[in-house]
Image: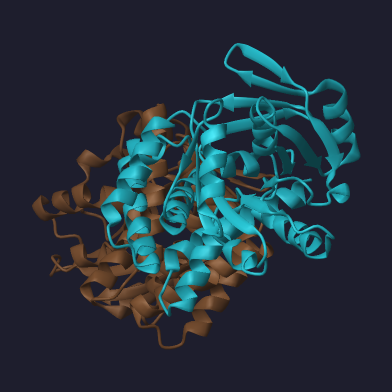
Chain colours: A cyan, B brown
Amino acid sequence: MRVGIIGAGSIGLLFAACLSRIFDVTVYTRTTEQAAAINQHGVKLLQGPKETVAEVKAMPAAEWQGSEDFTIIAVKQYQLSSILEKLKHTQFIPENLLFLQNGMGHLSMLKNFKESNIFVGSVEHGALRESLNTVRQNGAGTTNVAVYKGDKKILQSFADKVKKTFPMTFQEEYLTMLEKKLIVNAMINPLTALLQVNNGELVNNPFYYKVLQKLFSEITSVLNLERPEEYWEQVIKICKKTSDNRSSMLKDIEAKRVTEVDAILGYLINEAGRKGKESPQLETLYYLIKGKESQGEEMV
Amino acid sequence: MRVGIIGAGSIGLLFAACLSRIFDVTVYTRTTEQAAAINQHGVKLLQGPKETVAEVKAMPAAEWQGSEDFTIIAVKQYQLSSILEKLKHTQFIPENLLFLQNGMGHLSMLKNFKESNIFVGSVEHGALRESLNTVRQNGAGTTNVAVYKGDKKILQSFADKVKKTFPMTFQEEYLTMLEKKLIVNAMINPLTALLQVNNGELVNNPFYYKVLQKLFSEITSVLNLERPEEYWEQVIKICKKTSDNRSSMLKDIEAKRVTEVDAILGYLINEAGRKGKESPQLETLYYLIKGKESQGEEMV
């Protein structure tokens, strides 16, 4: 089975390294330089002290034709629109597409692809790209996958094959699955980025815990959550489990990179607007993070 | 005329240095060590390159009897309750009391003093204490003073004498005067402390400007402001005028000191509660700053 992976950031490289053990994988990169590095040296995967190298084919994303049996889109949400534009004009119709973006803002873009099976995933692996062809996996997680539209059996069969070497969990409801991840991201990412603290500080500091509670109450209302306790418990569990970790948004801010705040808080603020609800805390956090992002720009 | 100044922080020392040119001033300090330093070396005032030394009497605050003709209370709002407790048990009834605290939380405490003239002030001087007996004045401002209750003529006459050597402006309405200062403090202090930026960044960064606007709208509602434009313009003017300054709350957070967040945001949140209004942004900011304060404690 031929698998295409679009995007060779931390998640794209992690999937390339792990899936190449069972599939014929081609990874599509943003730059020709990165494709060359991967073709020449393979993808190096660091797991604790363990180091493995996977032989993986790589090409610049511009050469992607959508011809693989299964395509995983592993770019950031804010890079998605250019990929989707290309998808519209490719001569092949990709059979199966799995979207791994954070947030839920990309769902509205997926409605246009009538002829493909569309799957969505939520990645719980911690991964950090250390060079053009090196990725470090931090802690063991899983990838939750669910059907957005199309053939459920194909995704189940794919997940069954994958999970022999790489954890993958089939989920029945894509909306619940993505909402859970979205809420975790919306609660932990902006606050840790703003306060420049590790994830655990949000539950260890009683005042930050209070901020979490108030923010969660606003999100609960925006999303009309029916059983909020489940979602709240998950947030707290993840803060504790990843206590010493720095969130991806904090790392983005520190490295003066663009964050995923639009995909995460932007989506929730739009939802609030659509439903005629107030979202003052989400909006304040959104503009504070956007401000921090643009401070980064000024300093470059 | 004998003037007592309670508190020898930056504002207390600035007033002691300037008022001792025209009055017989005694400054009351928290520690005997500071009183000794002031008695021995005077109060050193630094204004740009200019350095002057004023001879000032000093005593530990425990020895204060309330016997001066005019007493200025220049401690932080959170130190006020112990002073007021002492005031209740003093054998003298102080004739004239001028309170210089930030915020408006202290007003409710002032109602108990039936026999004194009670004046309130809002200090617009920038001042930084550099040693036990040295204060640096940054930029020229004024002290606005108004009657809270009692004899207006006494305060006018005091301000007239003072302003020959030290700017002091008599204001007719104490509430408007304190609200203006409170709003400036509530807008600039917590945001700069949280974001660790100079005051000017709040108006220069378009996303932070958006946060200011949304926060102002909440404050306008909490205080039922009738002509909000005036207050808004003042905030923006002060951000621009003090563009390169670091706010007092930012300095407090950086130095791991207690901030004035209770006097400022705490007051507004109480007001909202009292009036049955929502204050989600103020509360979020409040808990974020309290969390930062307590992070400081942990690190000590």
- Judged left or right of residue A214, residue B56 is right
Q: Is residue A239 above or below residue B187?
A: above
Q: Nearer the viewer, residue A127 or B169?
A: A127
Residue furthest bottom as drawn: B226
| Quadrant including the C terminus of chain B | top left
On the rendered structure, is B283 left or right of A283?
A: left
The residue drawn where x is 55% and y is 74% is B234
Q: Please give left or right for residue A162 compared with residue A91 in the image.
A: left
* Vertical placement of residue A74 versus A133, above or below: below
Residue sitting at x 78%, y 37%: A26
- Identify the residue at horizontal 19%, vertical 60% (top origin): B94
Report whether B198 appears left or right of A296. left
In this view, A152 is above or below B55: below
Of all residues, the one furthest to the top in this rendering is A49
Quarter assignment of residue B177 = bottom left
Split into 4 quadrants, where in the image is the N terminus of chain B? bottom left
Which percent across, then down, holds residue A16? 70, 32
> Percent x, y for residue A145?
51, 46
Residue A231 lies, in percent from the top left, at 34, 50
Give percent across and percent down for residue B273. 24, 70
Above or below: residue A100 compared with residue B60? below
Is residue A251 visible from the viewing direction of this image?
Answer: yes
